[in-house]
Image: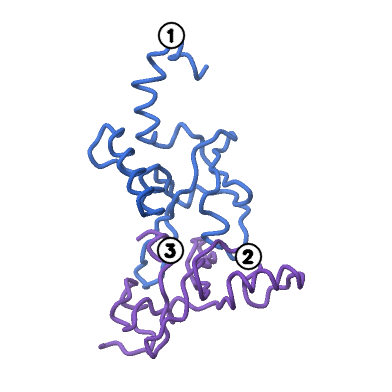
Amino acid sequence: MNQPEPVLLDFSLLDRQIVDSQGLMVGNVDDLELAVTDQGRLQVTALLSGQQVLGDRLGGRLGRWMSAVARRLSPTPDPQPLRIPYDLVDTVGSEITLTVAKDLLAEPPLEAWLRKYLIDRIPGGRDASQ
Amino acid sequence: MRASDLLGRDVFDTAGNAVGRIVDLIARHDADGQLMVSAALVAPGRRTRLFTYERPALAAPWLVHTAIRRLHGDVNEIQLSDLRLGPEARELPLPASLRQPDGDENS
């Protein structure tokens, strides 16, 4: 684990790219999940990634539009962001490296929608990852 | 709770006067390796992104220091337990143990 001490949440984490243990792009840090521990302390528990989260964070007309598009494209009425437990974070630098491979993480709803309705319909698109 | 719930929030002193906005949150690893938020960086004026040189006691070239000070004003590091996010302590969205910056457990 190689992380700065202290960690500035906005400067060091937000909007950074997330890559998995193989160096593959996972997404961006659009927000951070904080939880209150039993001792009343505030713990950073997860990285959140997704268009809906970014829209919520930006706020205003642009943020509402982004969230609305994310909801519209999501197969479920209440799309959940990609949630990466902070325990899986290995390195914090110009990018954030995880200790696990991307395959072990849940697929973001927007990516699932794009793959299902767009990429898979392109001739040869089902083999795009190969 | 999300970090964006705190970033950009107004901060008040004990008299209820606004002193600035939260521009960043400082977190440190505890003995178990968990990342705990310990303090907030509060700057007067509008919310813009920091360059990390704003942290108190952090040396910076004078030109950078002057430019950043003009942009952000004096940035203060305030411990989370001292943070007031409303004119009155009960307006804080933080947990109960953090809501009483005066140490008053009953208000």
The three-letter code of the residue at mark 1 reads: Pro
The residue under label 3 is which amino acid type?
A: Gln
Residue with the most extreme left position: A77
Q: Which circle, 3 or 1, is nearer the viewer?
A: 1
Label 3 resides on the chain identified as A
Q: How many marks?
A: 3
**Which quadrant of the figure has residue B71?**
bottom right
Q: Amino acid at mark 2?
A: Thr
Query: How far, Cα to Cα, is label 2 from label 1?
Result: 49 Å
Q: Which residue is mark 3?
A: A43
State left or right for residue A104 relative to residue B54: left
The answer to whether residue B105 shows anywhere in this view is: yes
Residue drawn at 63 percent across, 73 percent down? B70
State the purple chain: B
Q: Residue furthest top?
A: A123
> Are both tags, 2 and 1, on one chain?
no
For the residues marked 3 and 1, what is the alpha-carbon distance in whole angstroms? 47 Å
Residue that carries the numbered disc 2 in the rendered image: B52
Q: Residues within 10 Å of mark 3 (few under 14, many from 20)?
A: many
Where is residue A48 shown, x and y percent of the image? 42, 48
Reading the chain from its start, which is encountered first: label 3 or label 1?
Answer: 3
x, y (%) of residue B64? 72, 68
What residue sits right under mark 1 in the picture?
A123
Give the answer, above or below, for where A5 lies relative to B18.
above
**Front position in the image: B102 or A22:** B102
Q: Which chain gets the blue colouring?
A: A
Instruction: Give the SS element for disc 1.
Output: loop
- The residue that appears at 40% across and 85% down in the rendered structure is B17
